[in-house]
Amino acid sequence: METQAPKRTAAFFDLDKTIIARSSALAFSRSFYHGGLINRRSVLKSAYAQFVFLVGGADHDQMERMREYLSALCRGWDVQQVREIVAETLHDMIDPIIYDEAASLIEEHHAAGRDVVIVSSSGAEVVEPIGDMLGADRVVATRMVVEDGRYSGAIDFYAYGPNKAAAVKELARTEGYDLTSCYAYSDSITDLPMLLEVGHPYAVNPDRGLRREATGRGWPVLVFSRPVALRQRVPSLSVPSRPVLAATAIGAGATAAGFVWYLAKKRR
């Protein structure tokens, strides 16, 4: 009698505030400013959006507004230039804000023979290099429409909400994953459809909506609080040059300005 081979399994990770401590889509605003893609006002607006995201998360309406803002912002950008900027500044922008707990979980899932899949609403040009840096096996991300090498401003696939769940189901079909034995991690109530697809859902640093769902469904709630430079965990990683020190200073100032703007707005 033939024995059936065990089905494959995977761990699906949201990216922002689950693996990294910030919004990946907004983290590169200072680098895009340095590269001439956006102006100082856009940097300030991104810093403010980042502050709001960190303090309160983002509900459906806020995510839709962020999608519309980023789509309009990147219209006309040269795709190759974006990829080059991300490649040059990836370790400066993302490496220091990776949660140590998330990196350990990724290692544990790989050690157990599971694939690691990052599922993020940020753009593929940002998420794919982060996935490579983290050793992810696959990436699901938002894909923009490209015409003549430039973003048209339209979105081909928005990796958000129910679309994330659909992508997970499609991967399970093509890769042979047994979803009842798979894991998923997210911080946001907007990822509830994805969490419901797997047998082992986890809420990580959850917003109020997801915390309420996790408590009601008896799901584990994890708290990630230790950002660590990945190069400290994996010494073999090469240390890239740092061509964006000036941009980093600009970004720090923009974040402070965004915070002051927020407080002034609250007072008014």
Image: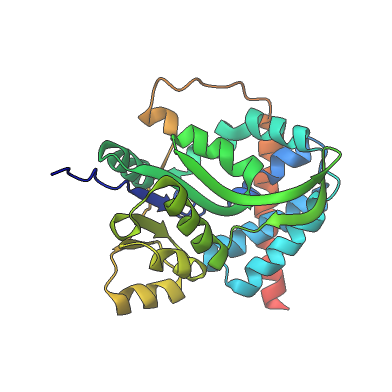
Relative image position of residue 119 (x, y in whole percent): 51, 52
Which quadrant holds the C terminus? Answer: bottom right
Dividing the picture into quarters, in which one does residue 100 lie?
top left
Vertical side of 3 occupied by 242: above or below = above
Q: Residue at x 65, y 41 (%)?
A: 125
Relative image position of residue 37 (x, y in whole percent): 81, 41
Vertical side of 48 occupied by 149: above or below = above
Farthest residue, direction front: 1
Vertical side of 37 occupied by 73: above or below = below
Relative image position of residue 74 (x, y in whole percent): 79, 49
Q: Is residue 180 visible?
A: yes
Vertical side of 2 occupied by 259: above or below = below
Q: Is residue 250 visible?
A: no
Q: In terms of depth relative to the viewer, which is nearer, 10 or 75?
A: 10
Farthest residue, direction left: 1
In this picture, residue 139 sits left or right of residue 236: right
